[in-house]
């Protein structure tokens, strides 16, 4: 197919459209999670996050005032309770109302509901009601009133206060947040330190068996970590580091080293040879070359691996369950805490949305701060 000069090939257009679709595929759920974290549970149930800026119809439940304390006898044997369902709150526009959850829209504003045996309830515009009946009917708990009302948009930071700062909330994310940081920071730094030394040796130092070591590193990239979980946990228990931070640090280090060495070695081997040879001629030791020349020049590769390792350890649940979390719950990480919230608060969407966004906020910040190094580090060494 002939291409007109100045026009982009179809494959370029297809690639650009695919990238845009992928970006939108990630942006919309993240934006929805962010917006939902500031909404109340009732509003999340009533309408989607995309309509959060507009009024929405919502079903509200109220009770009439306690008849034993508020009833007034108007005539022989007839008692009346008057009040307003919106007392102490904002007055909403009522679309319809009912006295049973099976018939939420049985009556319109101003109509009178026949509750049987002469007992009636009338609801007027603005939420004022008149409930009347005989002495037996006007006793006990107040009559339930279900409203279908137009509720204005409402946003609140109480969800974050409850999830992060409420000391009485045993399911809060604050402790899990710091537990996750305790796992992630060493599990990111340790493999980078070890892999940087190993990558330099495999790239610029001649020693017997170097090619075999490089082949072994490449082979370890395709080994599923699930194969090593049980043997590694058995070893950790044997040496006394099972179910603790040290054990999970070493596990993440071992699982992350092959990729780290592979990325860093490919980057370092592409650095100019003249710089390293001139440093050796000037009398620099291998350690000086590594710390003063190689490490500064390798920052893009180090940053790209740091992003991968940070995101993987932050979002990890499997390794944490195997090597860290115990019955005390003192070392619970955020992924495990969210799983528990799904079981205990499956209907509290505002709490789940807030907890989920807290768990992704730090990875998003890390990615956007270091994403300019990501492509440079990944592509380094791929071409000559």
Image (cartoon, grey):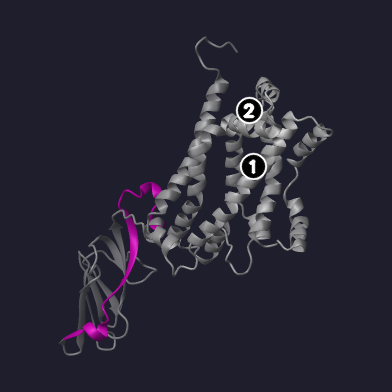
Q: Residue at x 63, y 62 (%)?
A: 325
Distance (Cα) linking label 1 and label 2 = 17 Å
Residue occupying the far right of the picture: 208
Closest to the observer: 187 or 58?
A: 187
Viewer-proximal residue among 283 and 307: 283
Disc on the earlier residue, 1 or 2:
1
Q: Secondary structure at mark 2?
A: loop
Q: Which residues are magenta?
A: 45-73
Q: Are marks 1 and 2 in contact (CB under 8 Å)?
A: no
Rendered residue at 82%/35% (across/down) = 212
What is the x, y in percent for residue 120? 25, 77
Which label was assigned to residue 192?
A: 1
Residue 308 in view, yes or no = yes
Query: Which residue has dot 2 on it?
Result: 380
Q: Position of residue 225 (x, y in %)?
A: 72, 49
Quadrant in the picture for residue 9:
top right
What secondary structure is found at the residue carrying circle 1?
helix
Residue 343: image x %, image y %? 55, 64
Q: Please tell me whether residue 174 is drawn above or below residue 312 in the rendered image.
A: below
Q: Quadrant of the C terminus?
A: top right
């Amino acid at each position: 197919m002939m291409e007109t000069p100045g026009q982009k090939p179809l494959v370029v257009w297809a690639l650009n459209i695919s990238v845009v679709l992928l970006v939108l595929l990630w942006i919309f759920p993240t934006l929805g999670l962010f917006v939902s974290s500031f909404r109340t549970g009732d509003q999340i149930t009533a309408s989607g996050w995309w309509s959060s800026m507009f009024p929405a119809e919502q079903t509200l439940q109220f009770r009439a005032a306690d008849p034993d304390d508020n009833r007034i006898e108007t005539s022989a044997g007839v008692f009346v309770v008057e009040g307003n369902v919106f007392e102490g709150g904002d007055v909403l526009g009522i679309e319809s109302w009912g006295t049973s959850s099976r018939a939420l829209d049985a009556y319109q504003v101003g109509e009178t509901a026949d509750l049987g045996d002469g007992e009636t309830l009338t609801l007027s515009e603005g939420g004022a009601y008149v409930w009347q009946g005989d002495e037996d009917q006007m006793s006990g708990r107040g009559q339930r009133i279900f409203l279908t009302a137009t509720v204005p948009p409402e946003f609140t930071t109480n969800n974050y206060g409850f999830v992060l700062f409420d000391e009485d909330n045993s399911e809060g994310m604050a402790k899990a947040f710091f537990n996750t940081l305790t796992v992630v920071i060493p599990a990111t730094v340790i493999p980078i330190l070890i892999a940087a030394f190993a990558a330099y040796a495999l790239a610029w130092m001649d020693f017997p068996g170097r090619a075999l070591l490089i082949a072994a590193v490449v082979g370890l990239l395709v080994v599923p970590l699930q194969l090593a979980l049980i043997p590694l946990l058995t070893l950790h228990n044997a040496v006394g580091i099972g179910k603790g931070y040290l054990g999970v640090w070493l596990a993440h280090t071992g699982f992350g080293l092959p990729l780290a060495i592979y990325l860093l070695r490919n980057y370092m081997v592409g650095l100019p040879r003249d710089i390293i040879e001139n440093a050796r001629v000037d009398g620099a030791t291998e350690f000086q070359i590594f710390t003063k020349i190689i490490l500064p020049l390798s920052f893009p590769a180090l940053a790209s691996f740091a992003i991968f390792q940070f995101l993987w350890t932050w979002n990890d649940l499997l390794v944490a369950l195997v090597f860290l979390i115990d019955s005390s719950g003192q070392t619970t990480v955020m992924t495990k805490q969210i799983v528990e919230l799904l079981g205990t608060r499956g209907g509290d969407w505002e709490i789940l949305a807030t907890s989920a966004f807290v768990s992704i906020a730090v990875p998003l910040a890390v990615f956007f701060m270091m994403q300019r190094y990501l492509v440079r580090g990944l592509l380094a060494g791929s071409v000559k």
